[in-house]
Amino acid sequence: MHSDTLTEYVLVNYRWVFVVFFLLPCTVLGKIWAVFEKKSWSRRRRSTGLDHEKKVEDIQCEVRHKNFHAPGRVMCTARPSWKSMTIAEMTYKKRMFNINVHLDEMISIDSHNRKVRVEPSITVGQLIPILIQSGWTVPVALELEDLTIGGLVMGIGLESSSFKFGLFHKTCTRYELVTADGDLITCSESENSDVFRCIPFSYGTLGFLTAIDIRIIPAKKYVRLQYRPIRSLEKIQSSLIAETLDVENNDFIELLMFGKNEGVLMTGQMTDGDQNTKNVNKIGRFYKPWFFKHVESLLLSQKHTEEYIPLKDYYFRHNNSLFWEVQDIIPFGNHPLFRYLLGWIMPAKVALLKLTQTDTIKQLYDKHHFIDDFILPISNLKESVEKFHEHLNIYPIWVCPTVLNPGNGLVHSHAPVDKMYIDIGLYGEPKVSNFNSSIVKNLELFVLKLKGFKMMYIGTYLNEYEFKKMFNHYLYQSIRIQLNCIHNFPEVYDKVNKKVRR
Ligand SMILES: Cc1cc2nc3c(=O)[nH]c(=O)nc-3n(C[C@H](O)[C@H](O)[C@H](O)COP(=O)(O)OP(=O)(O)OC[C@H]3O[C@@H](n4cnc5c(N)ncnc54)[C@H](O)[C@@H]3O)c2cc1C
Ligand SMILES: NC(=O)C1=CN([C@@H]2O[C@H](COP(=O)(O)OP(=O)(O)OC[C@H]3O[C@@H](n4cnc5c(N)ncnc54)[C@H](OP(=O)(O)O)[C@@H]3O)[C@@H](O)[C@H]2O)C=CC1
Ligand SMILES: CC(C)=CCC[C@@H](C)[C@H]1CC[C@H]2C3=C(CC[C@]12C)[C@@]1(C)CC[C@H](O)C[C@@H]1CC3
């Protein structure tokens, strides 16, 4: 066998050896280190009085220093590419001026005004458990623990409650920002409102976020989840639309499709249950099957089922298997023996997987793998699934309804009223013979034609003109001038096109 082919073969078939025997133990050490670091950090903080304001002043100093010594050089955060929740490498970071924006604390919870103030690098996995312990939660709680609040505001965040609350940033009420000149400004619906509307999806091109206020709502103990297997695409579309209209009775809606004409529609309500509550399924326990496998088993048995899932377990239901991505790396990861023996250290940290993937693995993913999300009007579900089936044939498909509101920021409904969209997430190996980048571009144009949007964490093949047709740049451009960004921050397109996000 040729040595390249042999390397490829070993990388594809035996990556699990490295992951199980090296990355998983490293993940555990990382978790222990994080606890230790947090403790010593809070001790240090108490003794030096270092707080949020001081950290923000440091960022302001760094920006002013850059303006003095390297005027005209555009800036980005110094967060290394391997830490970001995307498989893409952000090559732009190498040529831009990196500013250290590592702020990862929770600042305060204000139960009276129902809001929590956080720093941008705090992860969902750090924030949500603290909130739940205090009896609160965020309206849109993301499913992957390592996503950061800043990244979700600057990119796009959505979850199964988005049909009710919209995209993640719709639950944010105030941003604190260090501008290109090193000034500190705040914005909300009532103060610098145009800046406030343009920040979401701006990918850090209007300034550095230093604090975010997020609305909080009371947390309950469980999500009562109904699973409804459906075996017709028409029926899936009509049932999904009907459920999104029932805002009174539904708090969560999600659909997993396991084939072109079959899927499981899940609807849920947050509840405290009562003493008669039965059928509690603690899906977050380490020995439990991967969530999508559990759902698939209900499709196979054609059972309409209802379960009570602890709130935190529900939120992070796709974390253990990284949706269904872990099965490609550890093919036996859902085997009961593996779960009982090693499930407690799963999943391997995404950042570590990314940091340790070799060029060959990355190239294999580029050639044989697809990870992307498209946001389309809900009425186009059937047409879109058919299109993705023809050109990708990847299953399961994640479908998550989300309401978009009208507005003049970068992402908004194309109608003058609130409009229901769906996120279609495709992650896996395309089962078509001719998969290549021109198919991806073709799909992006399909989405553009339907007046939909693409999530940009993976990058885009659209050219600048097409990109600007997809995302409304009108207000954004004037805010860039107002905040003196033109020579200090790149444009969004310069951070998300495939040449710099590979
Ligand atoms: C980076 C990586 C990604 C993987 N992705 C998947 C996956 O998406 N689905 C899955 O079932 N298993 C995946 N695996 C593991 C699994 O072992 C291979 O997909 C499986 O061995 C392919 O077997 P085959 O005989 O059908 O492929 P073959 O048709 O023999 O594959 C031919 C060659 O294609 C490449 N290849 C095939 N599938 C993938 C792939 N998905 N990603 C990258 N290269 C690939 C390899 O170079 C392989 O030697 C992956 C493993 C790694 C390390
Ligand atoms: N369910 C969901 O909705 C999911 C969403 N995602 C995607 O993942 C991404 C979030 O991942 P994450 O790793 O948290 O974030 P990233 O590190 O990927 O950051 C995303 C963008 O936000 C910018 N950014 C982050 N923090 C700041 C800050 N303090 N000030 C200015 N800009 C900032 C980054 O700028 P810079 O380039 O300068 O570093 C970058 O352009 C989003 O793009 C999201 O769409 C992924 C999985 C699931
Ligand atoms: C729900 C939404 C909107 C998106 C989910 C996206 C995730 C499926 C991906 C986000 C980051 C991705 C990474 C990988 C798999 C897919 C994601 C979790 C890898 C773990 C795949 C293996 C590589 O070697 C490293 C990747 C890191 C990022």
Image (spheres, rainbow, N blue to C red):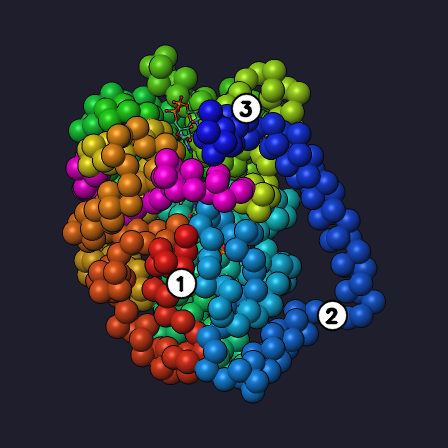
Q: Can residue 213 be seen in this view?
A: no
Q: Local crowd at mark 2 within 10 Å, few (<14), some, or many (≥20)?
A: few
Rendered image: mark on residue 74:
none
CB under 8 Å between discs 3 and 2: no
Of residues 247 and 257, the one nearer the viewer is: 257
Mark 3 surroundings within 10 Å by alpha-carbon count, few (fewer than 14), some (14 through 19), many (20 or more): many
Calculate the distance from the C-alpha at mark 1 to the C-alpha at mark 2.
32 Å
User: Residue 255: image x %, image y %?
Assistant: 34, 32
Front of the two marks 1 and 2? 1
Q: Nearer the viewer, mark 3 or mark 2?
A: 3
Q: Is residue 147 left or right of residue 255?
A: right
Name above or below for residue 263 compared with residue 116.
Answer: above
The numbered mark at residue 333 is 3
Earlier residue among tags 3 and 2: 2
Ligand 2 closer than 8 Å to label 1 CB? yes
Write the start and end of the magenta stretch as one range: 357-384
Place of residue 347 in the rendered image (x, y in percent of width and height, measured from the top left): 58, 34
The residue that disc 2 covers is 50
Residue at 19% x, 58% y is: 415
Find residue 495 and name its label. 1
**Real-space Cα separation, disc 3 to disc 1, in angstroms:** 35 Å
User: Percent from the top left, x then y, of residue 444?
Assistant: 24, 49
Amino acid marked by disc 3: Gly
- Picture quadrant where residue 16 is located: top right
Element carrying mark 1: helix
Q: 475 above or below 243?
A: below
| Magenta region, main secondary structure | helix
Q: Earlier in the sequence, mark 1 or mark 2?
A: 2
At x 53%, y 82%, the residue is 70
In the displayed structure, does residue 118 sit left or right of residue 226? right
